[in-house]
Image (cartoon, rainbow, N blue to C red):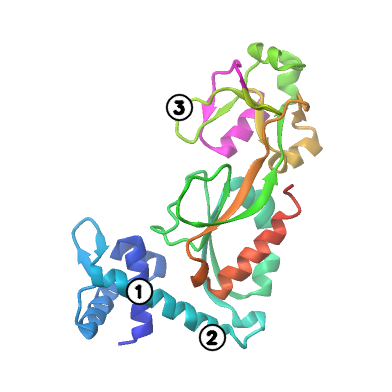
Amino acid sequence: MDKIHAMQLFIRVAELESFSRAADTLGLPKGSVSRQIQALENHLGIQLLHRTTRRVQLTQDGMVYYERAKDLLSNLDELDGLFQHEPTSVSGKLRVDMPVSVAKNLVIPRLPAFLQQYPGIELELSSSDRLVDIIREGFDCVVRIGTLKDSGLIARPLGKLSVINCASPTYLTRFGYPESPDDLASHAVVHYSLNLGTRPEGFEIATPEGIQWVKTGGMLTVNSTETYHAACLAGLGIIQVPRVGVRDALRAGDLIEVLPQYRASPMPVSLLYPHRRNLSRRVHLFMEWLTGVMKNYVD
């Protein structure tokens, strides 16, 4: 039995609470993962996991072993990379999640240079509007836009994205330019809500006294940033969006900024990851690279 490999499998199963999900993320047969962890338990003479048909949970002994095993593997990673400074020495799988707009507009265009510099890294890049469960789904780090909830994760602030109001020329030709927030009562605003059925409060304006919400017209609510942008381009209404996400459309004249003196609050951007002590070198390098990429677009 390869004890180091068995520890790695055990940690992944413990974090995902599933043999199947752990096997899928590692590209291994479920039976192989189960057998190796069983061999580890037999070698230690203890039960590490409670197994049921629905989920897998750590035993009391498993909790202790989990923490010690993570520390040990972290120290081994650091030792392996202690005298290796060549980019080609960095290898392994990296699992990252970020919003579609960040991936499409900022990361993907610059990603070839990163992967060329570190050819041994195999990157799995998830991008959607869904908030993934970092621990359960086995992500190394994620990018979040907006105010963070208390999650017990480590958060690295990357800055704030300026938010603008914009509409298509077609919409503005048909309905005219709003000149004050009061005009929005007769204008259509496309609403964004991650959970359909809950409608946003309206049009957001940042003031010295705090956020002010203005009632608007508009009959369309969407739960996808791609659909949100498409609705605006189609002339269905005004949207409030980070400037970086629509900069090309603004340059091309496909969208036009409106009410520039009445903007929403800038949106904070954060990098989240599970454990400061257990960062592998590849994760650390990617996060440093991503921080450098974001510096060009945040305040």
Marks 2/3: CA distance?
50 Å
Q: Sequence order check: which comes first, mark 1 or mark 3?
A: 1
The answer to whether 28 is drawn above or below residue 175 in the figure is below
Q: Which residue is drawn at 23% across and 79% down?
A: 41
Q: Sequence order check: which comes first, mark 1 or mark 2?
A: 1
Q: Which residue is drawn at 47% across and 45% down?
A: 130
Magenta residue span: 213-235
In the structure shown, which secondary structural element does the residue marked by tag 2 occupy?
Answer: helix
Q: Mark 1 points at which residue?
A: 9
Labels in figure, total: 3
Q: Do the residues labelled 2 and 3 touch (CB within 8 Å)?
A: no
Q: Dividing the image into 4 quarters, which one contains the N terminus?
A: bottom left
Q: Sequence order check: which comes first, mark 2 or mark 3?
A: 2
Marks 1/3: CA distance?
40 Å
Whether residue 53 appears in this view of the structure is yes
Q: Mark 3 points at which residue?
A: 198
In the structure shown, which secondary structural element does the residue marked by tag 1 occupy?
Answer: helix
Within 10 Å of the Cα at label 1, are there few (<14), some (14-19), or many (20+) other Cα atoms? many
The answer to whether 90 is drawn above or below residue 214 in the figure is below
Please provide percent x and percent y for residue 138.
43, 62
Please provide percent x and percent y for residue 259.
76, 24
The amino acid at mark 2 is: Asp
The amino acid at mark 3 is: Thr
Within 10 Å of the Cα at label 2, are there few (<14), some (14-19), or many (20+) other Cα atoms? few
Viewer-side label of 1, 2? 2
Q: Is residue 73 left or right of residue 235?
A: left
Please provide percent x and percent y for residue 220.
54, 23
Q: Is residue 229 highlighted in magenta?
A: yes
Please provide percent x and percent y for residue 18.
30, 62
